[in-house]
């Protein structure tokens, strides 16, 4: 009988302890409002990056290594512009952040141009025969 009484007491204490959470404030529904233009752009950018990665995986062995590199760099380019859109508001207030963003964009374009320069150098000149 004492064991049954102990279990009842523990259950009653647990019920009393958890009773306060029922009166907590309801959380707002995060998806109740429509997406803003920025959120839609970021969603599309993340989706495009995922598609680049999936295309690279699915086409493994069917396309050249250069095409895999191109898909990877395309994902990097999309990600760079998505971050620019995401943190673009900070750039107006902070000149140091704007300078860093400019340097990062120059770095991304330099990376893309190195890929294209390597591609042009690999081509054979038709006049050399």
Image (cartoon, rainbow, N blue to C red):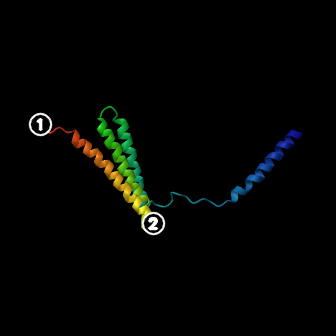
Q: Nearer the viewer, residue 45 or 105?
A: 105
- The local secondary structure at tag 1 comes to helix
Q: Nearer the viewer, residue 79 or 115?
A: 115
- Please state if 111 lies on the left or on the right of 87 as rendered: left
Q: How many marks?
A: 2
Residue count near mark 2 (Cα–Cα under 10 Å), binned few <14, some 14–19, many ≥20: few
Eyeballing the image, is 116 above or below 82?
above
Eyeballing the image, is 36 above or below 80?
below
Q: CA distance from mark 1 to mark 2?
A: 54 Å
Q: Nearer the viewer, residue 6 or 117?
A: 117
- The local secondary structure at tag 2 comes to loop
Q: Point out residue 126 in the picture as x, y percentages from the top left corner.
A: 12, 38
Eyeballing the image, is 25 above or below 45?
below
Q: Which residue is mark 1?
A: 128
Q: Which residue is mark 2?
A: 94
Q: Point out residue 125 in the picture as x, y percentages from the top left corner.
A: 15, 39
**Looking at the image, which residue is at 86% across and 43% down?**
5
**Looking at the image, which residue is at 42% across and 66% down?**
95
Q: Are marks 1 and 2 in contact (CB under 8 Å)?
A: no
Q: Nearer the viewer, residue 121 or 36?
A: 121
Q: Quadrant of the C terminus?
A: top left
Splitting the image into 4 quarters, where does residue 73 fall? top left
Residue count near mark 1 (Cα–Cα under 10 Å), binned few <14, some 14–19, many ≥20: few
N-term mark: 1 or 2: 2
Residue at the right extreme, as displayed: 2
Residue mark closest to the camera, 1 vs 2: 1
Splitting the image into 4 quarters, where does residue 27 fall? bottom right
- Please state if 80 lies on the left or on the right of 26 as rendered: left
**Looking at the image, which residue is at 55% across and 58% down?**
29
**Looking at the image, which residue is at 57% across and 60% down?**
28
Residue 55: give its label.
Answer: none
Q: Point out residue 38 in the picture as x, y percentages from the top left corner.
A: 42, 60
């Amino acid at each position: 009988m004492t064991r049954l009484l102990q279990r009842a007491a523990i259950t009653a204490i647990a019920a009393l302890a958890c009773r306060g959470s029922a009166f907590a404030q309801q959380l707002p529904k995060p998806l109740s409002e429509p997406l803003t233009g920025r959120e839609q752009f970021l969603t599309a950018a993340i989706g495009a990056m995922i598609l680049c990665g999936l295309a690279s995986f699915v086409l493994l062995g069917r396309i050249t290594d250069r095409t895999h590199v191109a898909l990877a760099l395309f994902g990097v380019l999309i990600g760079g512009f998505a971050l620019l859109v995401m943190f673009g508001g900070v750039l107006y207030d902070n000149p140091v952040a704007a300078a860093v963003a400019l340097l990062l964009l120059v770095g991304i374009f330099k990376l893309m141009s190195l890929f294209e320069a390597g591609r042009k150098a690999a081509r054979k000149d038709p006049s050399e025969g």
